[in-house]
Amino acid sequence: KSVGAPRWSELVRLLAAAGEVDSAESWIAKMVQQGYALDSRAYSALISAHLEQGRPLQAEAWHDEALRADVLPDRNTSLMMMEAAARSRYTGEVWVSRLDTCAKAGAHDLAELWMAKMR
């Protein structure tokens, strides 16, 4: 469905930006039940909010969900994910997976940034 989706995504984005991540996730569940999908801005806000609250695993889960939905989070959010990854437990396999995802999405500049972080 696309009718109404921008309003739902905007609500999720605003809640996440206000730090109300649990409320945002509750609204996402309602969106999914109604057949709506999140847009890039909503995913990016949710991922950023989790990172800002020190919840990198939840941010990673939403990042992966966005990629499964063929939605590439915005550049700033992707950079925040890279910084979190550089400070975390990521193995070489995970780095290659992130690099592959960026390349397949046509985000070659982000793929190059991931490569630079891997060095």
Image (tube, rainbow, N blue to C red):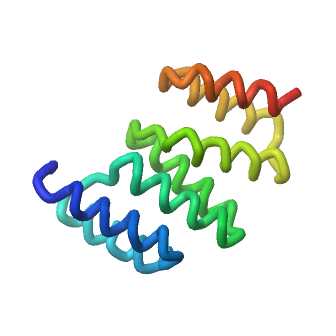
Q: Residue furthest left?
A: 3
Residue in view at x 60 percent, y 59 percent: 59
Q: Tell me the quarter of the picture where residue 94 sits.
A: top right
Please tell me how many numbered marks the rendered image carries: 0
Residue in view at x 67 percent, y 68 percent: 55
Where residue 73 appears, as percent x and y from the top left, is 49, 43
Q: Is residue 82 left or right of residue 17?
A: right
Q: Is residue 80 left or right of residue 22?
A: right
Q: Is residue 12 left or right of residue 64?
A: left
Residue in view at x 48 percent, y 26 percent: 105
Q: Nearer the viewer, residue 31 or 4?
A: 4
Where residue 56 appears, as percent x and y from the top left, is 69, 61
Where residue 10 appears, as percent x and y from the top left, is 31, 62
Q: From the viewer's perspective, is residue 1 above or below residue 67?
A: below
Quarter of the image with the C terminus is top right
Q: Nearer the viewer, residue 15 or 86?
A: 15
Where residue 83 appears, as percent x and y from the top left, is 76, 47
Q: From the viewer's perspective, is residue 40 above or below residue 108?
A: below
Residue in view at x 41 percent, y 73 percent: 15
Q: Residue furthest right?
A: 119
Q: Is residue 20 left or right of residue 99?
A: left
